[in-house]
Image (tube, rainbow, N blue to C red):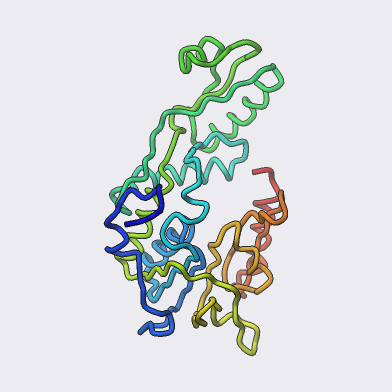
Amino acid sequence: MCGNPCCTSPGLHGQVLIATASLTTLAVMPAIVILGGGVMGASVAYHLAARGARDILVIDRADGPGGGSTSRATGGFRAQYATAINVRLSLLSRQKLLRFREEIGGECGYEPVGYLWLASSAHEMGILAEARAVQHAEGLPEAVEVSVEDIARINPAVVLDGIAGGAFCATDGFIHPYGILEGYLSAAARLGARIEWGVEALGLQRDADGSVNAVRTRTDTIPAGIVVNAAGAWGGRFRRAAVDILQTSFNFDEPGSLDVLVCGLVEARDQALGDIRTLFSRKL
């Protein structure tokens, strides 16, 4: 049984997720090592395996699924953003959520109950209108302006004093982060990915030409052709190590900063860096 209070599938661990063999005794050394078994690492493992990658190993320092930030997510989902890239990404995510059970398996918990934004002035209504124009241009026509009367109908609990109006999108709502994590972990395991819990990555090892060729843990050194840093807020310790990955993560050690690391992609490096800098130069 899982000790995590968020776990909804008691039988899942014994089926696919818990492995007890020492990493040094693994019969097949991994071609790809993914640092972090949260929803990002699990998704990467599944999508790589689905595209034919083999010998994938996911390691995580937690004792089981949901020991990091994934199980602490509030589970809000929305496409009402002010930037085109965020709207576009959310719409792609929504397509994935709608076919999650069929493609991945498990329950993502998507409930389109709507997101309601409130404005207290004409100026704030103008800001919402500008964002809505972006949303409509990117394919979100159901995002609409709402009046005070509409707000009272949508949510009678709202105190309307000082409210000028708002914005509402009925397809925004909630998801179940742990259900998504379980789905991706199980799907990745079905395709041959291995998941090891209780294994903390401490650093990366390089070969003579400077390329990363192994991951150092507390008890082992794991040879790897490719390392993917999906450790999220804890991934900053690897950012100076020239990992063979594309890493995008908020660095909690430096509030407000966004670290973007692209390395090991020799031919595409310059263009990738340019694209990433352009993407994150805007307010997200």
- Decide: is 173 above or below 107: above
Q: Residue at x 55, y 20 (%)?
A: 145
Residue sitting nearer the eye, 158 or 101: 158
- Decide: is 98 above or below 132: below
Residue 6, horizontal then vertical, whole percent: 40, 47
Tag count in the figure?
A: 0
Q: Residue at x 39, y 72 (%)?
A: 53
Give the left or right position of residue 4, taking residue 150 as reference: left
Residue 257, horizontal then vertical, whole percent: 71, 53
Q: Quadrant of residue 17?
A: bottom left
Give the left or right position of residue 178, taking residue 61 as reference: left
Residue 276, horizontal then vertical, whole percent: 64, 57
Residue 34, horizontal then vertical, whole percent: 49, 68
Q: Residue at x 60, y 75 (%)?
A: 203
Q: In the rendered image, which quarter contains the N terminus?
A: bottom left
Give the left or right position of residue 52, taking residue 79 as reference: left
Point out the residue furthest to the bottom here.
Answer: 208
Residue sitting nearer the eye, 170 or 33: 33
Residue sitting nearer the eye, 274 or 234: 234
Q: In the rendered image, which quarter contains the C terminus?
A: top right
- Decide: is 221 above or below 83: below
